[in-house]
Amino acid sequence: MTQPGQDQPFETRTQAHAALGALVADQGASLYCFSADYRAWPLYQPAFIQQLEQWALRDARRLDALRFLALDWSQVRERFPRFAAFRRDFAHLVSCRQITETGARGLVEMAGSPRCAVYAHTATWMSGETLQTAARVHALRIRFEEVWEQATPAFPAVILGL
C-alpha cells in the first residue's frame, strides 16, 4: 500500500488491480466491496482469488467478515467461476447483497478495510484512489454501511436445482 496516512491516486486498471490486491493482502479484520457488477474487478485472476483465500483462512472464526454488494449479480457466477468457488467454499465468511441503483445513491466502485480503502472514479477502474486518510476511509465505510442496510441477500453460495 502507500505510506501510512497518505492517499494515492491511480491512473490505470493495472494499478487499480494492484491496489485491490494490496488491500486484501493487508489482512484487515473485515473487507467490504461494492461494484455495479464486478465486471472490471480482478476476480478472474488466480492470484487475486488466492489472496482472498489467504485472507479468509487467517481467521476462519469470523462471521460475515467479507461483504460484497452489487447492483447486478446475474453474470458473476458464469464470468468468474473461481470467485464463485471461493464464495461457495467460504460461505460462512462471505455475505453478498444486492441493491437497486436508486438505493445505492451514488456509492462509488470501492473496496475497503478498517485501515484503508480503494475506490474508482468509474466502473471501469481506469482511475481512482487508494485512501489511507482515516477520515476519508471512515466516511467511505459509513456510506457503504448505509447502503448495505438497505440491500437484500443475493448471489447465494450454492444454487439448488431440480
Image: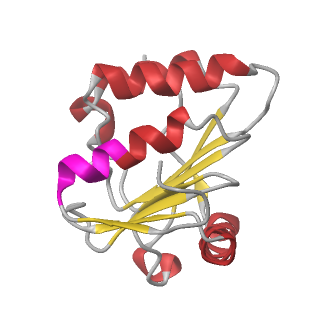
Q: Look at 52% across and 78% down and name the residue there.
A: 103
Look at the image and give the residue range highlighted in magenta: 12-18
Q: Look at 26% across and 71% down and name the residue there.
A: 122
Question: Is any part of residue 107 visible from this angle?
Answer: yes
| Front residue of this view, candidates 69 and 138 | 138
Q: In this view, does 28 lie above or below 32?
A: above
Give residue 44's position: percent from left, percent from top: 25, 30
Residue 148 painted magenta: no
Q: Viewed as shown, does residue 155 lie left or right of 61?
A: left
Q: In this view, does 36 lie above or below 33?
A: below
Q: Main secondary structure of the magenta part?
A: helix
Q: Residue furthest front?
A: 3
Q: In this view, does 120 lie above or below 27?
A: below
| Front residue of this view, candidates 69 and 4 | 4
Give residue 41's position: percent from left, percent from top: 29, 46
| Front residue of this view, candidates 86 and 159 | 86
| Front residue of this view, candidates 41 and 6 | 6
Q: Residue furthest right?
A: 61
Question: Is any part of residue 39 visible from this angle?
Answer: no
